[in-house]
Image (tube, helix red, strand yellow):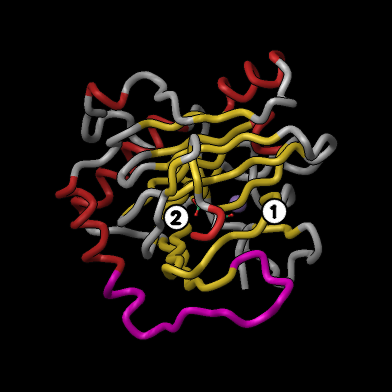
């Protein structure tokens, strides 16, 4: 099943090949000006103290309109071919993801490659794994709270959301009353690293729970295009 996840209940079920790393060019496609600057897309629970809030604001960021509608269409066109013959999986009660299909994509067409390289240059100060993880969540799908495997994935995770807005929730592992809700608009980019990546479980809420600042956020089918930094070399 899932590539990089460690569910709270289930341990990783399938070994993940360590993909080759990719050092990206910083010169391809410039980042649109409006994506610079952090959007106020985080909502903190009352139990979230100021220090935690500040660390989270540093280590979990959402950038609106990271890609244009045209770039979204180009990505979808290439991805639909990839997903055409696979079915959504709803199988096991202990899977971290419900209602999904996924792929690992090592290469992209030229136009989309440019967008992927822009993501890499924008979100990562180091190399990223060569394979891009693409996760297609059905409208009734959701991702349960989990931590990405520390064995197979490094300190930074960054994804573009296609097709719909959704709500991601981060729950502090040691202090579960401390939680943060993040609105991920369609075509936005999120960067989750360090403190946010290691000290919190993250999840994508299903529609019955999907609220942000008291407003319902209806998630339709959602595709995320996710890059990860490689795990640190084991000593
Ligand atoms: C994952 C994950 C979030 C997303 O695949 O580990 O948390 O944006 N995905 O789809
Ligand atoms: Mn994850």
Image quarter (top left, top right, bottom left or bottom right) of the N terminus: bottom right
Residue at the extreme left: 70
SS label for mark 2: strand
Q: Earlier in the sequence, mark 1 or mark 2?
A: 2
* Res 146 label: 1
Question: In the rendered view, would you say 183 is above or below 63?
Answer: below
Q: Position of residue 212 (x, y in %)?
A: 48, 40
Q: Is residue 37 left or right of residue 15?
A: left
Magenta span main SS: loop
Q: Residue at x 47, y 73 (%)?
A: 101
Say which of marks 1 and 2 sits in front. Answer: 1
How dense is the environment of label 1, judged by Cα within 10 Å: few (below 14), some, or many (20 and up)? many
Q: Residue 91 magenta-drawn?
A: yes
Give the magenta part as a residue range. 80-97
User: Mark on residue 132?
Assistant: 2
Task: Report, in whole angstroms, how far the alpha carbon at label 1 lies from the one at label 2.
Answer: 19 Å
For the point 41% across and 83% down, which residue is it?
A: 86
Q: Quadrant of residue 28?
A: top left
Q: Nearer the viewer, residue 211 or 150?
A: 211
In this rendered view, identify the residue nearer to me: 191 or 78.
191
Q: Residue at x 44, y 48 (%)?
A: 216
Q: Which of the numbered marks, if any, corresponds to residue 107?
A: none
User: Mark 1 vs ligand 2: CB under 8 Å?
Assistant: yes
Q: Is residue 120 left or right of residue 78?
A: right
């Amino acid at each position: 099943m899932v590539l990089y996840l460690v569910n709270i209940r289930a341990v990783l079920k399938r070994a993940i090949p360590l993909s080759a790393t990719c050092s990206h060019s910083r010169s391809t496609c410039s980042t649109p000006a409006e994506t610079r600057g952090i959007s106020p897309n985080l909502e903190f629970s009352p139990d979230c103290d100021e220090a935690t809030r500040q660390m989270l604001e540093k280590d979990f960021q959402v950038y609106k309109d990271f890609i244009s509608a045209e770039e979204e269409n180009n990505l979808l066109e290439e991805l639909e071919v990839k997903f055409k013959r696979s079915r959504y999986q709803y199988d096991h009660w202990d899977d971290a993801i419900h209602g999904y299909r996924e792929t690992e994509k090592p290469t992209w067409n030229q136009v989309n490659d440019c967008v992927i390289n822009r993501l890499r240059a924008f979100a990562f100060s180091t190399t990223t794994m060569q394979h891009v993880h693409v996760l297609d969540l059905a409208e009734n799908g959701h991702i349960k709270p989990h931590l990405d495997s520390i064995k197979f994935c490094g300190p930074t995770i960054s994804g573009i959301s296609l097709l719909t807005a959704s709500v991601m929730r981060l729950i502090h592992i040691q202090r579960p009353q401390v939680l943060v809700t993040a609105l991920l608009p369609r075509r936005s980019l999120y960067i989750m690293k360090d403190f946010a990546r290691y000290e919190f479980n993250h999840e994508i809420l299903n529609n019955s729970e999907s609220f942000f600042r008291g407003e319902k956020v209806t998630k339709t089918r959602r595709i995320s295009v996710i890059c990860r930094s490689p795990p640190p070399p084991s000593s």
